[in-house]
Image (cartoon, coloured by chain):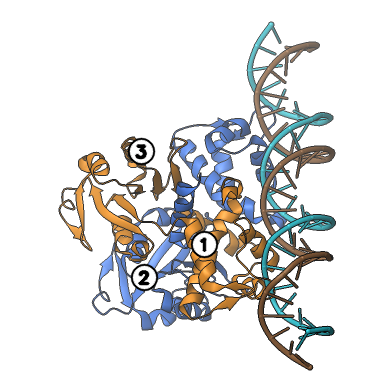
Chain colours: A blue, B orange, C brown, D cyan
Amino acid sequence: MQKSSRVSEAVIRRLPKYYRYLKDMQKSGVERISSKELSKKMGLTASQIRQDFNCFGGFGQQGYGYHVSELCDEIRKILGLDKEYNVIIAGAGNLGQALANYVGFEKEGFNIRAMFDVNPRLVGLSIRGVQILDIDSMGDYIVNNEIQVGIVCVPKAKAQEVTDEMVKRGIKSIWNFAPVDVEIPENVAVENVHLSDTLYTLSYKMNED
Amino acid sequence: MQKSSRVSEAVIRRLPKYYRYLKDMQKSGVERISSKELSKKMGLTASQIRQDFNCFGGFGQQGYGYHVSELCDEIRKILGLDKEYNVIIAGAGNLGQALANYVGFEKEGFNIRAMFDVNPRLVGLSIRGVQILDIDSMGDYIVNNEIQVGIVCVPKAKAQEVTDEMVKRGIKSIWNFAPVDVEIPENVAVENVHLSDTLYTLSYKMNED
DNA sequence: TATATATCGTTAAAAAAATAACAATAATTC
DNA sequence: GAATTATTGTTATTTTTTTAACGATATATA
């Protein structure tokens, strides 16, 4: 798995999709699958699938195909979903609350430990057992509770500031939903989500031909 | 703009990002920008930017650069954001409510007309003036109110069913947040969002080196 | 057990995307 | 107003990504 650092962004972005489909198949009791069958289901080519998996060593067997649950486990590991993470959410507005309420993240090891907000009306409340604390206490909380992942759901104007504080206190991963690309140092990972981007793409497609 | 149908997916997916940066600059009063300056801000190459814009005709001026507001307007048009759309949301859970509360969409012409849910406790309530109606009335509502865009925020198990109903009643664009790829006929546009995909990518990056 | 079939991993070819180069032209300077 | 500079649009080159081809190997069949 030393190849990792040379795996292209395109491949990496397909991994979660593989994982989704494989998890589903595993759940439905499918035991084996060939690259050809999988390609049909996922709308990719069989060639690409084999090539993608081979970036990480290749988990199949000639003449047989892939063991679904084995392959699924491998991809889980590659994605780092076999570990547990401590997570906080900055911004307890609608989106922050929606994320806190979604149980799927916890199933994959992302445990939301606390939420933070400036609004005194929200501070003190709980969402699914997760407390909303004052945003001023976020820095110390990160340090004291070994938080690795920070989710940014604050308004655009506060996003960079909140991110900076997270990074300063040792967070190594920023999942940002504010509609602005936040800047981070090289050793920190970031995903700027930009929900509306996909809406605009949809708008483009709708008006295309 | 006849070229449209031959513009690559990669370019199309960058358009919303250009639009974001240009809108910001326009707001801050920036009048002109060169591909070189823009490339620095956005983390792209100047070459790529010029090439991207030229897919749609090229809006610059040699020796000068681009007029920010003019370029911004052009991209708005290309994305179809100069029009108005009637939108509904299926599923008034946390995510549905979060989307209904976000005013940014309306600013770009996506007017949320109604929400739909199965939960009788939610039916009858309003979010920012948008009524939550019974999901069974969705089909007729779509027809009677000329709805063009359907946002799917229902659980995974119901996503395809709800999508089918939307398509059957004439919706031409599906923005799907359920964690499954919904299938649609060829003449309908779809964006399957998959929030957790970016979290998993983040997880990969965090564990990389 | 030998033969046929399926299917992978891998190498080769093709296609697509990104980058670089440059001629054309507008703006600016002297 | 001529010369210089800036910067585009466009063509050429390079790189990356995708697709196709195929030998190797395991499974299934006769």
In front of the other: label 3 or label 1?
1
Please give the residue where the numbered disc 1 appears in the rendered image. B75
Which circle's residue, 3 or 1, is located before the other in the chain? 1
Q: Distance between the residues labelled 2 and 3?
A: 40 Å
Above or below B40: residue A204: above
Q: What element carries label 1?
A: helix
Above or below A130: residue A207: above
Number of residues whose C-alpha sits closer than 10 Å to that of mark 1, classed few (under 14), some (14–19) or many (20 or more): many
Q: Are marks 2 and 3 in contact (CB under 8 Å)?
A: no
- Report x, y in % for residue B77: 48, 59
Please give the residue where the numbered disc 3 appears in the rendered image. B167
Give the chain of mark 3: B
Locate residue C15: give its quadrant: top right
Which amino acid does the dot numbered 3 rest on?
Val
Number of residues whose C-alpha sits closer than 10 Å to that of mark 2, classed few (under 14), some (14–19) or many (20 or more): many
Please give the residue where the numbered disc 2 appears in the rendered image. A114
Give the chain of mark 1: B
Q: Distance between the residues labelled 2 and 1?
A: 40 Å
The count of marks equals 3
Give the chain of mark 2: A
Along the horizontal axis of the image, is A55 left or right of A99? right
User: Which residue is located at x 28 percent, y 78 percent?
Assistant: A119
- Report x, y in % for residue C23: 82, 64
Q: Which of B8 and A28 is in front in this view?
A: B8
Along the horizontal axis of the image, is B11 left or right of B177? right
Which amino acid does the dot numbered 2 rest on?
Ala
- Report x, y in % for residue B57: 61, 58
In front of the other: label 2 or label 1?
1
User: Which residue is located at x 57 percent, y 45 percent?
Assistant: B5
